[in-house]
Every structure is written in C-alpha cells, then in structure tokens.
Image (spheres, rainbow, N blue to C red):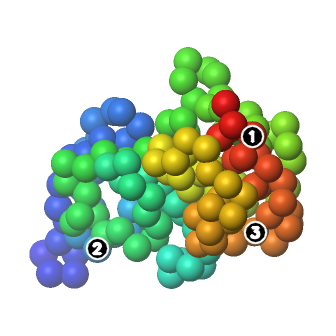
Amino acid sequence: MSKNRRRIEIRFRVNRKLRRVCVHPLTRLLDILRLELGLTGTKEGCGEGECGACAVLMDGELVNSCLIPAVQLHGRSIETIEGLSKRGRLHPIQQSFIQRGGTQCGFCTSGMIMASVALLMGKKHPSSAQIGEHLAGNLCRCTGYSPIVDSVRKVGKK
C-alpha cells in the first residue's frame, strides 16, 4: 500500500459517544463529521478557517473543523450542533436563535451557535460588544448580525 493511501484508526468522542474511524491522517475533522459519521449540521464555507461555518467544540474549545486533521483527534472530545439538544429539547441558544430571527438561510447558523455556546461557557453575561468581538470569526451574509447578537444577549441575561 502506498504512503498516500495509509489509514489510521482514530478513537474519540463525538457528542458524548465514543467513535472509531479509519481515515488518512490528514483527513479533516469536518469531513469525518459529515462523510464518516453523517453529522451534516457542521457546514463547509471557505475550507480555510476564515468563515466559522464549520465551528465545533474540541475539548470545550471553539475550533474550525476544516483546519483539524484526523491525526490530532485521538482521545479528544468533539461537540457538534447535533449534540447540543438534550432529550429532544433544544439548547437555550438554539431556541433563542429561532425566537429572535438569528437564523436566515441557516448556512452559518451551526457555527454561530457553537461560537455562542463557547462564549457563554466562559462569560455568563457578555455585553453586545463582547458578543460581537467573539463572533467576529463567523461570517453571515443574511442577518446583519443584530438578530444574532440579540439571540446571544438574551440567553446571557438568564
């Protein structure tokens, strides 16, 4: 077998479930989530880590999954948009995005929500400026950001 076709086994947690995949060492986390595991909520926008559409939490830290190679995943914990709801109930930030119009076409939504979750994990009551600064790595062409900031601010007030 040629070096270019070498595959490795990766064991890691995705949305609290132990998963095992055999992939090329440089396969992107984004592709593993979407193609190997069928978790299509994470979107590919730019493929270069600039737009935030593919944002997920890795060991509780926000990362762009298009930049994470498989070789860095062994033993790690990944949370995707699909893992936020519990027992069929939406996460409060998901519910807030729906109620306040933080979603439009929906393409950037999962990345925005994951970035918002990361922010709220570290800062319970962020200001609008702090929300805007934290979400600066996530691009949206539909909403003008105001409904997104409102969605995050509403959850942060609770």
* Percent of width and height locating residue 106: 76, 55
Residue at 85% of width from left, 43% of height from top?
A: 100
* Percent of width and height locating residue 60: 37, 48
Residue at 64% of width from left, 22% of height from top?
A: 89
Q: Is residue 100 left or right of residue 42?
A: right
Whether 18 is drawn above or below 46: the answer is above
Would you name the residue on which mark 2 appears?
26
Task: Residue type at mark 2: give it.
Answer: Leu
At numbered mark 1, what does the secondary structure look like: helix, strand or loop?
A: helix
* Percent of width and height locating residue 16: 36, 33
Would you name the residue on which mark 1 appears?
154
- Which callout, 1 or 2, points at the residue further toward the start of the chain? 2
Quarter in which the N terminus is drawn: bottom left
Residue at 65% of width from left, 40% of height from top?
A: 156
Task: Residue type at mark 1: give it.
Answer: Lys
Mark pair 1, 3: CA separation: 20 Å
Residue 147 visible (yes or no): yes
Q: Nearer the viewer, residue 101 or 34?
A: 101
